[in-house]
């Protein structure tokens, strides 16, 4: 199996079905793709203020991906004051050749009105068949019941995912996703990566026949 296949081993996630996450936009460096980069060791960086959420997000992405490694052991409070050159030097000294970053760039609240609906309740006839008597009237009586409309508020989370080549020291793929009504970090992270993989295939960054 080629090494670049290990870049995103999310085959099991692809069977999860539909998600509440969609791709908003993406971009690929025309001169780069995963096969060309041949990543051997990739650092995953979740740019989140809450340390617990950051660790959970990174651990979710690196799970079952042997070339992926969480960043919090290297990029933490002890290295926050280092220059970008010093941080890059640390990564290279640890033989990292790629970085994947994920960050929340915006939150959007949207209020929608869900219209009311009518429902019919049909009553069967009494079955005597004596013309237009009470039995026929009752048999075709179908009262309408109205369910009132209501307002529903949705929260959309806009997340940017980037792939950097450390060997070239440049951004080679980026995608923005929109997730609605997040329930937990692990599920949402998985959903984002499902859509990211699909978009990478569409963009030609990943070979869809790699599996």
Image: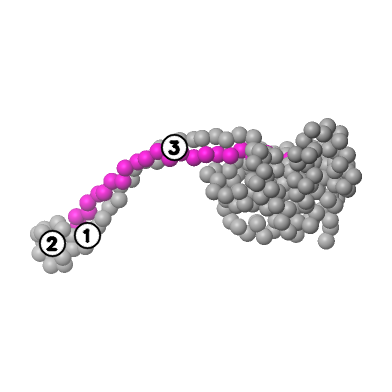
> Relative to 21, does residue 125 appear above or below in the rendering?
below
Q: Which residues are magenta?
A: 140-162
Task: Report the disc number at residue 135.
Answer: 2
> Tag 3, which secondary structure?
strand
**Residue at image mark 3:** 112
Q: Quadrant of residue 175?
A: top right
> Relative to 11, does residue 180 appear above or below in the rendering?
above
Q: Quadrant of residue 104?
A: top right
Task: Report the disc number at residue 123.
Answer: 1
On-image quarter of the C terminus: bottom right
Residue sitting farthest toward the front: 78
Q: Work out whether mark 2 precedes mark 1 in sequence or the reverse, and give the earlier one.
A: 1
> Tag 2, which secondary structure?
helix
Q: Work out whether mark 3 precedes mark 2 in sequence or the reverse, and give the earlier one.
A: 3
Residue 5 percent across, percent down from the top left: 79, 56
Count residues near mark 3 (Cα–Cα under 10 Å), then give few for <14, some for 14-19, many for 20+: few
């Amino acid at each position: 199996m080629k090494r670049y296949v290990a870049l995103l081993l999310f085959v099991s996630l692809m069977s999860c079905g539909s998600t509440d996450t969609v791709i908003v936009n993406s971009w690929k460096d025309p001169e780069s793709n995963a096969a060309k980069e041949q990543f051997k060791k990739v650092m995953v960086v979740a740019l989140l203020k809450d340390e617990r959420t950051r660790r959970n997000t990174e651990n979710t992405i690196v799970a079952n991906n042997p070339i992926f490694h969480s960043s919090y052991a290297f990029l933490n409070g002890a290295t926050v004051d280092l220059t970008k050159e010093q941080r890059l030097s640390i990564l290279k000294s640890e033989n990292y050749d790629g970085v994947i970053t994920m960050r929340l760039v915006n939150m959007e609240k949207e209020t929608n009105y869900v219209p009311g609906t009518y429902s019919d309740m049909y009553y069967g006839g009494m079955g005597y068949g004596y013309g237009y008597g009470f039995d026929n009237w009752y048999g075709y009586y179908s009262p309408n019941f109205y369910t009132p409309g209501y307002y529903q508020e949705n929260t959309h989370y806009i997340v940017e995912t980037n792939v950097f080549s450390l060997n070239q020291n440049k951004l080679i793929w980026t995608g923005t996703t929109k997730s609605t009504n997040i329930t937990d970090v692990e599920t949402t992270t998985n959903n984002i990566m499902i859509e990211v993989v699909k978009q990478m295939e569409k963009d030609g960054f990943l070979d869809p026949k790699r599996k």
